[in-house]
Amino acid sequence: MKLITATLRAYLLFTLLAFVVGGAITIVLLKALVVEEIDESLWRDFEKIQETIETEGEMTFGSPTWEREIHFQATPLPASINWKDTVIIGVDDEDDEMEEIPFRQLTVNQTINGYGTQVTLRASLIETDDLVEVVSISLIILFIILLAGLILINRQVLRKIWHPFFQLLESFRSYRVTDQQPKKLPESKIYEFSQLKEAFLSLTQQAETDYNSLKNFTENASHEIQTPIAAAKTALDMLLQNEHLEESQQAHLHTLYSSLNRLSRLNHGLLLLTKIENRQYTLDEEIALNAVLQKSVEHFGEMAALKDMRLHFHSEHPFSIKGAKALLQILCDNLLKNAIQHGHAGSVISIISDGQSFSISNPGNPFPIESKKLFERFTKANPASGSLGLGLAICQQVCLLHGLSLTYTYSDAHHHFMIRKAYPSL
């Protein structure tokens, strides 16, 4: 739910509650006030009747009516005053139909001039009900006007006030630390939005500073580490060409040469992972992944042939993705190389692409480790191999960078690596 919608809902719920409670209280108070006025009017009428009887003696006030009844008797009555609401069946003056008519009734038992006198006075409450109805309709109309006003304010005023916030939100979404471009952020007179803008600028500046520091470190580390390794390998090459070396010395030099090669590959793999994880590659090129796969198949054709394997590549539809071609080539090379290394001699490695995914399958023995650990760094499916254990970890990071999902399953004595389009690249 959007913030504006949640705010409007809270306003509406509060307004509805306020109108229901306030309206009920207003109607009750109004009705009580009107009844009080009617009671005062009835009592004044009684006082006039009492004064007339005391002044003029017993008199006849005509036949009883809805509004007034007076009865006399010789025996004095206990004095009492009784107020109540009552209903009388009568004929409505407007439509001449029988209906229940509400009245406010005052009954007074009192001895006047030695006679027990009961005076009953009534006043119609129809006008009071009409007044309550008018007030209720007025409150409903007022609520509708207020509701329309709140919706209008939400759509116009609040959207205008919150516009800088949505622009800041879009800046957050589109921000890439690799862009290194000035941020065009909106100006706002709202204090909280200005604070949010300053926080965003501070955060991005710190992120760019850290990114540049890490980028410079990886580039310098790559150069500074590879340079002495290359120099050491050159020196070893010269030593290995010396014909006067003994076999034991040559064996030690070969071991040292292999270690340097391993150290060089390790340095290259770790630096590559660091660059991928810190998004130091631009993903602005449209890549035909079918062509990249085809190139990997051609490149590893001889390696597969040495193990008496055959590579079968089948592409049904074009598979295009926006990204870095060099990384996608590494992805395909690593997966295909992994299939050749762990496949059975004389088997067929199947590479299939359908436009939304591609898979690499090969027969082989199950790995002695859990499937979810295959993509962790320095995890080897075969501990005795000379692998560094970084190939599948690099594949996983390349897929994450390009918005692809990489999964592994083992079924029917076959290893299956599947790559699908999962979500937009970051």
Image (cartoon, helix red, strand yellow):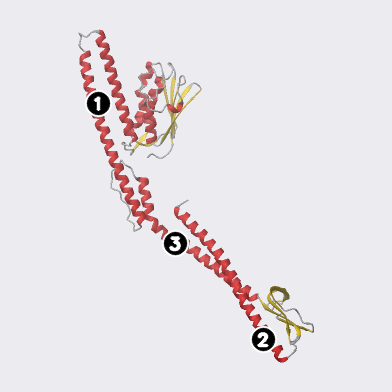
* Sequence-earlier tag: 3 or 2: 2
Vertical position of residue 287 compared to residue 263: above or below? below
Looking at the rendered structure, the secondary structure element under dot 2 is helix
Q: Nearer the viewer, residue 322 or 104?
A: 104
**Residue type beneath disc 2:** Lys
> Mark 1 and mark 3 in contact (Cβ < 8 Å)?
no
Is disc 1 placed on a helix, strand or loop? helix
* Res 153 label: 3
- Tag shown at residue 293: none
Q: Residue at x 31, y 25 (%)?
A: 266
**Residue 376 on image: x %, y %:** 40, 28
Give left or right: position of 176 versus 55: left
Distance Cα–Cα, label 2 vs label 1: 119 Å
Identify the residue shown where x is 61% and y is 78%. 37
Say if residue 63 shows up in the picture: no
Q: Nearer the viewer, mark 2 or mark 1?
A: 2
Kind of residue indicated by mark 3 = Ile
| Residues at marks 3 and 2, CA–CA distance in whole angstroms | 58 Å
Of marks 3 and 2, the one in the foreground:
2
Q: In the rendered view, tell whether residue 308 sits above or below residue 74.
A: above
Picture disc at residue 48? 2
Outermost residue, right side: 74
Q: Secondary structure at mark 3?
A: helix
Identify residue for label 1.
226
Tell me the crowding category of disc 3: few under 14, some 14 to 19, or many 20 or more residues within 10 angstroms, Cα based. some
Name the N-terminal-most of marks 2 and 1.
2
Residue drawn 23% across the image and 28% down it: 224
**Residue lying farthest bottom?**
56
Q: Is residue 102 above or below residue 10?
A: below
